[in-house]
Image (spheres, rainbow, N blue to C red):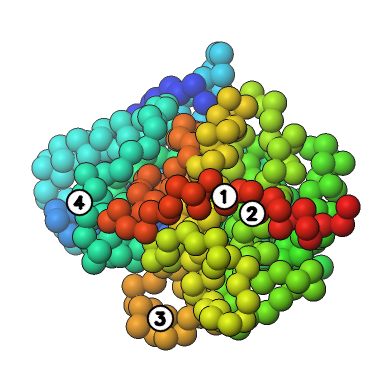
Amino acid sequence: MLSITETLTVARSQHDCFCYLADLRKLVEWDPLVREARKDTPGPVGKGSCFTIKINIVGLSVPFRYVITEFTPDRRIVYSGRSAFINVNDTIDIVSGDEGCQHITYRADFFLKWGLERLIGNFAKTTRTQYNAAISGLYSALSSMPSEATIHPKNVKADAQTISALRCFTRHGYLSGRRTWAPMSYRLEGRHVVLTGANSGIGLAAAIELAAAGADLTLVVRTQEKAAATLQTIELETGRNDIRFELADLSLLCDTEALSQRLLQGGKPIDVLINNAGALFNQHQLTREGLEQSYALLLLSPVLLTERLLPLLEAHELPARIVNVVSGGMYAERLNLKRLNLSADGYRGARAYAQCKRALSIMTEIWADRWRERNIVVNAMHPGWSDTPGVQKALPMFRRVTRLVLRSHAEGADTIVWLAQSPQGGLSTGKLFLDREPRSTYLLGNNVEAVADRAALETQLNRDIDKTLPT
């Protein structure tokens, strides 16, 4: 047996440290030998939770099966790891010190199999070196404040070629980007997050992650049945049942207005507003307010909701954040005001969707400039190509061709969560993010809108909102 013990001191809360260390999926952020980490059991992280961790050993990716065998909240975690060659027992104790510092003692006991103990000398030296690197990574993850996110040089090159840029939209782009991400160890307790479109797809995946991170969540869904199903899913995954729900059909401006008034009357400040609700409609249809449904749901509704909720987004010590979920489909479209609120003649669902997402990305930039001095940051993100219910229903041929490279819901939602949770998410404004990096709003510099259309966009949106809502 080889035993190694290290102690580090960090200026973080005991709860933050414990939650970060208890979730072994976070190992990829600070242990340089970990290539992949996944949670295999449902429910919140706790005693009995199982994980598969793939560790690089002598150039081989060796899977370990880890189980949490002891779980004392905020104080102690014990894991037991098993592989074909080595077993590991890790014990972590967290003790509060002076001035909010935490003393973390990390002990690892290694047990070699199949007579490999004969190599214990070399093994001990190599393991101590690697262990020290991991502990250094953990200290950095719990202590460092990352700088503003920038685009990686490889993605600057990728964005110069259509095929390479589109490849970034696939699961490959997510997995490639993950290798360079800064750790995300900060939590969201006490931070109020309002998320629309939370009952399925990347919205539900984001809601689960935000709940697990401790956010004070208000989720907007259409019906009580969807709210009940969403709460059941979140409780199963995180153990939390204190999620608030607001019911609204966001394709109707009267419902959006009523929602905003309820939130304003409640008076609860909003730290993060995530405009995620959306759908791609292949068939042209008008809402009962006489608006084309894509235009109403994807553009007018988030514009109305965001501007109405401005009083709850202001007056924060930390910058409030607005996250607008757009789509890579917008790269194929130049803003054309005549293609917003289309009639049935000439309607194409994918084009209507892309036009609205293009317009929302432009509003993101307009809001960012306007509200910069009001302590509000506004960013957009696109989730890449994710295997969402919307893709499955509205784009079956696209899914059939790309299904092997589509992202999971959680992978598509990752940048939403990062923009809401990470300190880095509050350092940028007016940008479009993919995989936690700012990317060009115009692929290869194409489809840049006319200056006149950009200037007239907000006027048209306000006119249509004012025409639709009762005076």
Q: Residue at x 88, y 52 (%)?
A: 471
The local secondary structure at tag 2 comes to: helix
Tell me how far mark 4 sits from mark 3, CA to CA: 26 Å
Say which element carries label 4.
Answer: helix
> Residue pushed farthest top?
98
Is residue 314 placed above or below 365 in the rendered structure?
above
Marks 4 and 1 close (CB-CB < 8 Å): no
Q: Identify the amino acid type marked 3.
A: Phe
Whole-angstrom CA distance, mark 1 to mark 2, is 6 Å
Query: Which residue is labeled 2 in the image?
Result: 460
* Whole-number angstrom distance, CA of label 1 to CA of label 3: 34 Å
**From mark 4 to mark 1, how far is it between C-alphas?**
34 Å
Whichever of labels 1 and 3 marks the residue nearer the N terminus, that label is 3
Q: Which mark is residue 157?
A: 4
**Which quadrant of the view contains residue 338?**
bottom right
Q: Amino acid at mark 4?
A: Lys
The image position of residue 313, as x and y in percent, is 69, 35
- Few, some or many residues within 10 Å of mark 3 (<14, 14–19, 20+): few
Left or right: where 51 falls relative to 390? left
**Nearest to the observer: residue 413 or residue 12:** 413
* Foreground disc of the pair 4, 1: 1
Give the residue at mark 1: 456
Q: Which mark is residue 398?
A: 3
Q: Mark 1 falls on what kind of element?
A: helix
